[in-house]
């Protein structure tokens, strides 16, 4: 395929010219491969993979996982409705989050979800009250905060006592005892989650080892059925360069990167003797490297101090660099020989934080060229906004030689469709 960038068998340039930019593109085969690799690696243990919908909630993405038999990790009423709209099975859904409303709990119970991951005692009491009104027994797992440092970004760490999530280890047994005394609560499992974008097996191993004694006690005393180890498996965003040539021109697997197999090898010896079902909630690991954001160069601006590559995508389309200082590899859709240069890659939004890269070494690009922001399948479109009255980009799913639009570009006049003048302004 020469030096042109493809998604499966479809040239990305053809999609950009057809649908315009900015544009999200996802590979269905990559989604399927990532799910199946994890499912296969864990085959020796009874397990349930619950895809974390917050990573990418497009209906076509959800349908892909539903067709593979996936469960879903949801954090809102809206996400549960999305799963249902995509054909997902609510009895394979776990409901996480620290602020579940009465309406959300009621709807989830009516849909017979697999389990609530309970984050506090007041939440446990609320679930019991609502289940009583519905004359049901609500299935719950208590989310335990194991106080394990995941060594990831501060804004995506969830497993220490400085975070808002879960219940402290030294108090959790008392909460389980309380749960068993509530008539409309069914204690079903144990849950933890230590953070996101974790690229080493060690934090997972440390957290599971810390939780195992508790899991054994709960199995014997309260007959729990599963142990959820949460999500957080990381992906490669910043591949090493080899002889000045970027990762996307070579197929060699990056060394030292967590994989489905290495994750399973690390955790299964700990979990198999426990005799409980394993539940896990991966998001980014399944979708992150299955998507790109395509953008087009508008201007090359040279100042006295630096060069700027100004593109038509912005922080409202992909906020991760502005929000987390996150790295995304930037790749031209068509590669040409020439001198590399250093530049900031920035968007058109009126914020100094609207950038995708600072002082990045880039291959030769010029005005009108298309670029791909790689590994944009997770926390891209789902975190988009209409800031600066910019419309949401379309989303495309590719399978083999076929492509299909799975979200239309938002019409500009839809931005104010639900806004109104004040009553007195119509006089």
Image (cartoon, grey):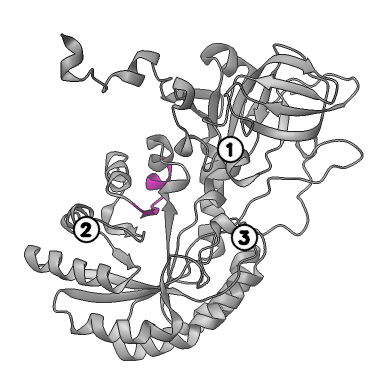
The residue at 19%/54% (across/down) is 111
Q: Which of 38 and 172 is in front in this view?
A: 172
The answer to whether any part of residue 196 appears in the image is no
Residue 86 appears in which quarter of the rendering?
top left
Quick one: label 3 or label 2, which is nearer the N terminus? 2
Bounds of the magenta segment: 64-75
Quick one: label 2 or label 1, which is nearer the N terminus? 2
Quick one: label 1 or label 3, which is nearer the N terminus? 3
Magenta segment includes 100: no
The residue that disc 3 covers is 198
Could you classify mark 1 by the number of other residues whose Cα lies within 10 Å: few (under 14), some (14-19), or many (20 or more)?
A: many
Residue 203 is situated, as x and y percent measured from the top left of the image, at: 62, 70
Residue 91 is situated, as x and y percent measured from the top left of the image, at: 27, 58
The C terminus appears in which quarter of the rendering? top left
The residue that disc 1 covers is 376
Q: Is mark 2 on a helix, strand or loop?
A: helix
Q: In this view, does 47 lie to the left or right of 198?
A: left
The residue at 85%/21% (across/down) is 304
The residue at 78%/40% (across/down) is 247
Q: Determine whether label 2 and label 1 are within 8 Å by CB.
A: no
Q: Is residue 356 left or right of residue 271?
A: right
Q: Point out which mark residue 105 bears.
A: 2
Q: In the displayed structure, would residue 230 be above or below residue 12?
A: below
Q: How far apart are marks 1 and 3 (CA)?
A: 17 Å
Q: Distance between the residues labelled 3 and 2?
A: 30 Å
Residue 116 appears in which quarter of the rendering?
bottom left
Residue 161 is situated, as x and y percent measured from the top left of the image, at: 50, 73
Q: In the displayed structure, would residue 231 be above or below residue 349?
A: below
Q: Distance between the residues labelled 2 and 1?
A: 32 Å
Q: Nearer the viewer, residue 124 or 16?
A: 124
Could you classify mark 2 by the number of other residues whose Cα lies within 10 Å: few (under 14), some (14-19), or many (20 or more)?
A: many
Q: In this view, does 119 lie to the left or right of 339?
A: left
């Amino acid at each position: 395929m020469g030096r042109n960038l493809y998604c499966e068998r479809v040239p990305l340039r053809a999609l950009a010219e057809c649908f315009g930019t900015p544009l999200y593109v996802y590979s269905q085969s990559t989604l399927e491969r990532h799910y199946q690799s994890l499912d296969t690696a864990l085959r020796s243990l009874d397990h349930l993979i619950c895809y974390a919908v917050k990573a990418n909630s497009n209906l076509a993405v959800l349908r892909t996982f539903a067709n593979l038999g996936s469960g879903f990790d949801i954090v809102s009423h809206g996400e549960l409705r999305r799963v249902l709209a995509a054909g997902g099975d609510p009895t394979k859904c776990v409901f996480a989050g620290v602020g579940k409303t009465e309406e959300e709990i009621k709807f989830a119970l009516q849909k017979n979800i697999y389990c609530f991951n309970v984050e506090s005692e007041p939440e446990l009491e609320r679930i019991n009250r609502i289940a009583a009104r519905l004359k049901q027994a609500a299935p719950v797992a208590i989310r335990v905060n194991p106080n394990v440092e995941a060594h990831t970004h501060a804004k995506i760490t969830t497993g220490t006592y400085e975070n808002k999530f879960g219940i402290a280890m030294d108090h959790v047994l008392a909460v389980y005892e309380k749960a068993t005394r509530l008539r409309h609560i069914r204690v079903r499992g144990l849950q933890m989650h230590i953070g996101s974008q974790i690229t080493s097996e060690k934090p997972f191993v440390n957290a599971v080892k810390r939780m195992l004694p508790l899991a054994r006690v709960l199995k014997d005393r309260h007959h729990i059925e599963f142990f959820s180890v949460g999500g957080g498996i990381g992906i490669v965003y910043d591949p090493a360069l080899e002889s000045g040539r970027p990762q996307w021109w070579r197929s060699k697997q990056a060394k030292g990167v967590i994989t489905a197999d290495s994750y399973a090898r690390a955790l299964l010896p700990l979990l198999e003797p426990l005799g409980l079902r394993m539940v896990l909630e991966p998001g980014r690991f399944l979708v992150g490297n299955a998507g790109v954001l395509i953008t087009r160069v508008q201007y090359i601006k040279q100042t006295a101090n630096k060069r700027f590559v100004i593109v038509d995508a912005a922080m409202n389309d992909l906020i991760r660099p502005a929000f987390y200082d996150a790295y995304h590899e930037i790749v031209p859709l068509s590669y040409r020989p020439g001198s590399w240069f250093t530049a900031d890659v920035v968007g058109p939004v009126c914020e100094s934080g609207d950038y995708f890269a600072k002082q990045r070494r880039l291959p030769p690009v010029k005005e009108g060229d298309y670029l791909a922001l790689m590994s944009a399948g997770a926390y891209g479109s789902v975190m988009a906004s209409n800031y600066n009255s910019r419309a949401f980009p379309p989303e495309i799913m590719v399978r083999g030689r076929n492509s299909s639009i799975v979200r239309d570009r938002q019409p500009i006049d839809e931005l104010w469709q639900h806004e109104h003048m004040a009553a007195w302004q119509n006089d």
